[in-house]
Amino acid sequence: MRIFYLLIFLNTLVLSVLAQKNTRGKVVDQDENPIPFVKVQEPETGNVCYTNDQGEFVLNYFESDSKLTFTTSGYDTLRLALPYDKYTTVFMSAKENTNPYHMGFMVGFLDFKNKNKNKNLENMTYFLGESDINRQLQMLPGIEQGTEGYSNLFVRGGEVDQNLMLYNGTPIYNSNHIFGLSSVFHQRSIANTGISRGISSAKYGGRLSSTISLESSKTGSYSGVKGELEITPINAGIYIESIKKDLSYFTLSARRSWIDLLIPAESRQQSVNANIYDYQIGYGKYLKNGDKLDFSFMNTRDLYFVSLQTTDTANGNIPITYGITQKWYNVLASVNYTEQVTSQLKRVHSIHYSSYKNKNDYSQETYDFNLLENPLVEEKLQRGIRDIGLKTDWEYAFSNEHHLSFGWQNTFRQFLLGANNLISKNYPNQSDIDTIVGNPNYQTSIESSFYGEDKYFFSKDVTLDAGLRATIYSFDGYTKLVAEPRFHLTYFLQNNDVFKAAYNRHNQFVNQLNLGRSGSPDNIWVPATGEILPQNSDILEIGYERKLGRQFSGTVNAYYKNMQNLSAVSNLNDASNPEKDWKSSVVQGSGKSYGLEFMFQKSKGDFTGWVSYAYSKSVRTFPDLYANEFLFTFDRPHMLKVYGNYTNEYSIWNFSFNYLVGSGQLFTLPIGKFRDINGQLQLEYNTLNNYRSPLYQRLDISAGRKNINSSLSSEWRFFIYNVLSNRNPLYVNADFANASYTELVINRNYLAFVPGVSYIIKF
Amino acid sequence: MKRMNEKQINTIILLTITLLTSCLSDTVKPDILLNYTPKITVNTDFDNIWVAGMPVSLEITTSEGSIDSELPKLLKDATVEYVANDGSKGSLLYNAASEHYVTSKSFIPGTAVQLNIKHPSYPSVGSLIRFPETIDPTGTLSIAGGLDTSGNPADKLAVSFKDVSGVNNYYKINLYYFNNSISNWVPLTVPRTDPSLAGYNSIVQNDGGILFSDDLFNGKLKTITMNVSLGYVINNLGDKYKITLSSISEDLFLYYKSLQRAQDAKEINFQGGYNNAVVIHSNIDGGLGIIGTQSKEDVILK
């Protein structure tokens, strides 16, 4: 109730202050790309404001008969009279030879629409030809895939669970298909992917490493309907987009695996089945009063089932069927209501739901024809997590110099930590059993955050973002109040370069227990508790960005990150056993990472792409695992990544490649063997992650050929992953070949020359 | 209905895997394994953890490279010397019968001992150990004063001791029953009803005892209560209970804890990372193994 009164008070305060004249709008180039830091000036009064990262501005104290001037480097100065209280889109003409690189946004932020645009990512080389948002991100500096071939994201020495992945503002808890080989996001279903690699505004919080924002298409350059049909070795999909510019939009993206459909239906039910699907629906509408309503829904599912039949020869050749099923799914839904209260105040109210559940079923059925009913044993293990989130985010142009943003975000997060339903029935002379081991009920945590941030345009060259995010967290009697300062300085050195510096603190109240492999659907989401304390981090980052000529740009970033209360599983067996308290299998420690990243990109012309190099180091300290500091599993000190793409609109061919070379992945190998206090043989590990595999090198290539002769535009794309067949280990398995511990064999598995193909029809 | 047979299923799986991936494998011998230098391994074995006030002994073996075909072997010709802070110094000599290095010297609680072990074929190792202080436990017995897990009457045993504040202390508790008819102490399993014995920071031993830490009672008077099923003492003249409470070294506790994890991890397939690679704790500088120390005290309850 206090929160409600606080919001009413803020609302009244803000509305009462707003009796000033102003105009607002958005400044864009001819391609409708936003132009940041355009100086918007009222010459007669000297009132000045600057456009933000989205190109938007609000100018206060506006006289009706004056013409505003719009000036920024590289564009023709514009003089224009704008009406009061109206939202106007202002087009500016770029001068010849202008480099359109977007110098705004916070340090460490990257996306594919503003900061790293025009890269023709639809033609990127994808694993198996399966278009994948995560694979795009993996090519950026400071973001690693982790285990070779997988679609995971490790950002600047952080864990997978430290990424807050938001689909239209709703968090998703498992973004993987096929046990981590593919993400659930097709590149066609996402209009823009943005990633904050550590530094973010106070609006975002709850994870240590990154915020990844995936936005479906909501607008376009013109009204109309367009779409694509695509088939790959795994999936067949359809993508439809219907835009009524500035009125409404509707998007549908759906795909499903098709190989399983080749198997007879009865076999899919009784022998083997494997299929995946995902679909996303978006709808938005501008209301008559100018407000906007957005709906978003998403559902993903993976299903794997195998059944084997054997014969119990010891008991009269009785057939026995064993069945193993694994199924996991996400359901996401959100509604956003955006209202322009006054020309200076905008509010977005949202409600979202996100659910992830993983089910593992095992069954054993005995076909004894002497019995009326078949004896059956079943185990059904369920785990999951779900969010119900409410939030209201306000943006208020307090003056030409101060733009405020503040809000409240509340998440009811529920954990299904593990419930195993054990069933045994129809066994002669035995009572039926139907019991549940573990906790079948969801346990709820509440995370309530308030934030406020002032974007202060200190001068024409300097902008300071100063914010604070406070969170109250409670779970099972444990309560924690944390405050997170957020500072960001932007300093334009000249017209072509910018310096940025920032400090952030982050807290994380949810952990994912890694049961052996990152990205696995079996990994368990758990809450922070009084025993397993919330993770936190402090991040310092500086960055320098420069336009280079007409087509190129370069960035340099340096960061230092200190992490506390990180979690690791000390006993995989116990952690995955719902009978046991998961907390007893978790140990906590600390970590730090630092690095220097360079990125050089080309955004114009037929040939586009980027070259990045990252030097980094990431270490962990878990006294319960090892007495000393050790390297993080996915630490890679050196990594050079090159993405190149040739696309010419008049050519029927397009080409693309990814090239990566750098430090190999770490594994832990036993170096020796010795006798323990009981006289048993033990393996000696001098430290954890003690073996770095040889130089990582990978070249992926793709070629696309358009068919423009038919009535429908279509395209074939061919891909090869790791065309150099470099032996980048997927796993390094060390095991003794015999029981006497005298012959240790180290096997290395790797992916080489993996082909892929896709066929696309556009309409 | 027609079911697919196993062969058909395997064919589809094989075709799918072949089509979708090109997963290859080879065998490697990384330099880190080829360049392994064997070390001296020193252990006080399970039955011979060094007890204050009693003679001490050691087993010395070698370690071998994980990819070597050789297994660790006894080292019989090492030089083992000690210097204690009570002014004493001497040697431990190899005893062929027990295959241990032994001395008749004993150390009182609180004594620190520097041990140095040399061998011409291996790098020298050393260890600085300390015998924990005694804790003077007291106990009570209430015949049929408690209930067992089934709700039946049980003997209620309690042992109390004062934990030293400001430092991490570690203990081991064992429970015995003296059977007068066979004139022998029979070990019983210590019930894990006390939070300090049931939590993650406690380890069950093969002899029924439990190692535990003072995490939950640092600096306080601690009483551990155990209910033992009725039928032992009340009807048998001369029968009695014994609670053995030992203050053990931190190194020994950490060693057993890591050993327990290593045991659990063996049941899991190796998949890289460190989830199931366990670094077993050691207090041997330059070598491997553990020299555990304890100060043991008995509380007889009748």
Image (tube, rainbow, N blue to C red):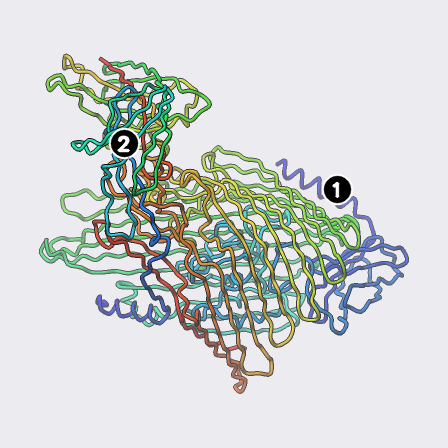
> Which x, y percent locates residue B244?
27, 21
- Residue A347 sits above or below residue B46 on the image: below
- Is A521 placed left or right of B107 in the picture? right
- Per the image, label 1 sits on a secondary structure element best described as helix
Location of the N terminus of chain B by quadrant is: bottom left
Amino acid carrying mark 2 in the image: Thr
**Nearest to the observer: residue A208 or residue B142:** A208
Residue A596 place in picture, x, y as percent: 59, 55
From the image, tell me which residue sits under label 1: A13
Give the labeled residue for mark 2.
B44
Amino acid type shown at disc 1 = Leu
**Which disc, if any, is residue B269?**
none
Mark 2 vs 1: CB contact within 8 A: no
Q: Is residue A183 left or right of residue B286?
A: right
Res B208 seen here: no
**In front of the other: A505 or B248:** B248
Answer yes or no: are tags 2 and 1 on the same subunit.
no
Q: Chain of mark 1?
A: A
